[in-house]
């Protein structure tokens, strides 16, 4: 079966952006999408919680999707400082990132917690962007494949499909460092992820699921990364804060 997966370029703004800059960035990206002739990719921006509603207004009527950077597993309750998937959906989001390496490291999030968050996202009608990836020490010890396979198996909830889930491979040691795995390494890991998804979901569903690469994606390396068979887009960090860089990365999918 031949499947054409539409590339997804997702921007994770992390803890960056005050109102003026955030709105300016969103508005500029919206203008470029409107001016483009049928873009061959999907765009997603994930601003900090403080900007979601206002960025949503700036993107109203535009093809750019809006997402959150995390959600709580519960729909509501006594969880001070947290945001539920239902609240994100109510604010106009269609996606949410779960299990980002910075959440796993800074907040000691386990695969089990990521799994429940992804399930909560689905229950709220959101697409869960589930992040997996190895640390530098795990890579140096030759554990990349084992770690990625374990995280995928434990973080992916039952009922996951290509319609409600995106997988993002982010080698932790490459995020924000300017370092990236070799093209052969990225190709191998993504191919293994696709294979593991096939065992879990069946070949047809695995073939339809989008797999993003995240880890110091920049305009100068994006085209080579996006050309790989099992790379269906990118989860972009720092470069997503600059309209020129983010747009250039998206254009590399053409």
Image: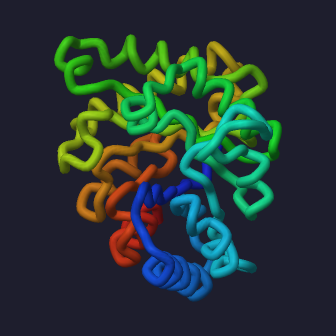
Q: How is the image coloured?
A: rainbow
Residue 198, percent from left and from top = 62, 20
Which residue is at a point 40% across and 51% down the rendered structure image? 226
Q: Above or below — where is 174 with respect to 110?
A: below
Q: Is residue 145 visible?
A: yes
Q: Quadrant of the N terminus?
A: top right
Q: Quadrant of residue 172?
A: top left
Q: Is residue 1 visible?
A: no
Q: Quadrant of residue 186?
A: top left
Which residue is at a point 43% across and 80% down the rendered structure image? 21
Residue 188, percent from left and from top = 36, 26
Closest to the observer: 89 or 128? 89
In the image: residue 55, left or right of residue 133: right
Closest to the observer: 3 or 157? 157
Residue 227, percent from left and from top = 39, 50
Q: Above or below — where is 245 with respect to 194?
A: below
Which residue is at a point 46% across and 56% down the rendered structure image? 12
Residue 18, percent from left and from top = 45, 74
Which residue is at a point 22% across and 37% down the rendered structure image? 182
In the image: residue 96, left or right of residue 238: right
């Amino acid at each position: 079966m031949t499947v054409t997966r539409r590339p997804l370029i997702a921007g994770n703004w992390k803890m960056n952006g005050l109102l003026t800059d955030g709105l300016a960035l969103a508005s500029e990206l919206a203008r470029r999408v409107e001016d483009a002739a049928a873009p061959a990719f999907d765009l997603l921006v994930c601003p900090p919680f403080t900007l979601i509603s206002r960025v949503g207004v700036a993107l109203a009527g535009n093809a750019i999707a809006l997402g959150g950077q995390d959600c709580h597993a519960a729909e509501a309750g006594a969880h001070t400082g947290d945001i539920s998937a239902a609240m994100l959906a109510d604010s106009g989001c269609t996606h949410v990132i779960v299990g980002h390496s910075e959440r796993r490291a800074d907040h000691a999030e386990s695969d089990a917690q990521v799994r429940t968050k992804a399930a909560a996202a689905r229950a709220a009608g959101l697409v869960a962007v589930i992040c997996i990836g190895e640390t530098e020490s795990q890579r140096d010890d030759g554990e990349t494949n084992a770690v990625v396979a374990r995280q995928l198996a434990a973080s992916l909830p039952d009922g996951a499909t290509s319609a409600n889930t995106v997988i993002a491979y982010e080698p932790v040691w490459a995020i924000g460092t300017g370092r990236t795995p070799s093209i052969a390494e990225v190709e191998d890991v993504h191919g293994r992820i696709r294979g593991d998804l096939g065992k879990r979901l069946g070949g047809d569903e695995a073939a339809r699921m989008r797999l993003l690469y995240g880890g110091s994606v920049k305009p100068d390396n994006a085209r080579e990364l996006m050309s790989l068979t099992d790379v269906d887009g990118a989860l972009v960090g720092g470069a997503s804060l600059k309209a020129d860089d983010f747009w250039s990365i998206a254009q590399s999918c053409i």
